[in-house]
Every structure is written in C-alpha cells, then in structure tokens.
Amino acid sequence: MTHGGLELVKDKELLERQRRFTQLIPELKELFYPERLDKLNLWSLEERRVRDDLIEVYKVCLLYRFRAYLNLKTVVAPEDIL
C-alpha cells in the first residue's frame, strides 16, 4: 500500500461504506460526496488517515523527549544521550 492511497481492499470498502451512508440522508442524496461530507461535518478517509499519522508522529516525538528527559535525570555521558 502506498501511503495515502486507497490500495487496500479494506480501505476501498470503508470508503464505499461511507459514501453509501451519506447518501441515505434524503436532503443530501443529490449532492456530490465531498459536499455531503462538508454538510455532515465529516472528514474524508484520506483526511482521517493524515490526522491519525500526525497523532502517531506526535506520540513518537513525545516518547522520545520523555526518554531523553529520563536519561538526563541519571548520570550519563553526553554522547550516550542520543
């Protein structure tokens, strides 16, 4: 799977499920998919994936900083911190 792509069958099924769900609302049935998402205040699958990736990057950075903080609390040589 390429990052940000819809290569996986699971992703395609999820996207199709979201499209069908948004069409069930009679007032939105005639709108295009991006317009339906906007009216319902929903994110597209790609936007959710980017958001999830950003959250994971934040967690990794936070963990790295926490570990560096713990290393500074003990007696460690500067070259061993990184």
Image: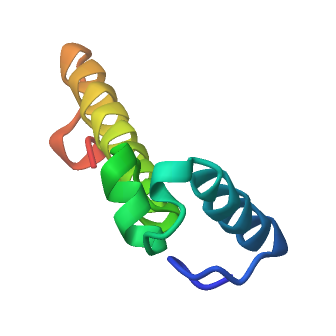
Q: Residue furthest top?
A: 73
Asked if 27 appears above or below 15 in the picture, the reply is above
Q: Residue at x 43, y 46 (%)?
A: 56
Where the N terminus falls, by quadrant?
Answer: bottom right
Asked if 41 appears above or below 33 in the picture, the reply is above
Q: Residue at x 23, y 19 (%)?
A: 75
Viewer-nearest residue: 2 or 67:
2
Asked if 21 appears above or below 33 in the picture, the reply is above
Quadrant of residue 34 within the rendered picture: bottom left
Quadrant of residue 65 within the rendered picture: top left
Q: Number of numbered discs present?
A: 0
Residue 26 image offset from top left, x and y in percent: 56, 50
Viewer-nearest residue: 30 or 51:
30
Q: Is residue 6 left or right of residue 48?
A: right
Q: Is residue 6 left or right of residue 9?
A: left
Q: Is residue 54 left or right of residue 4?
A: left
Viewer-nearest residue: 23 or 54:
23
Residue 68 visible in the snapshot: yes
Residue 51 image offset from top left, x and y in percent: 37, 52
Residue 10 image offset from top left, x and y in percent: 80, 65
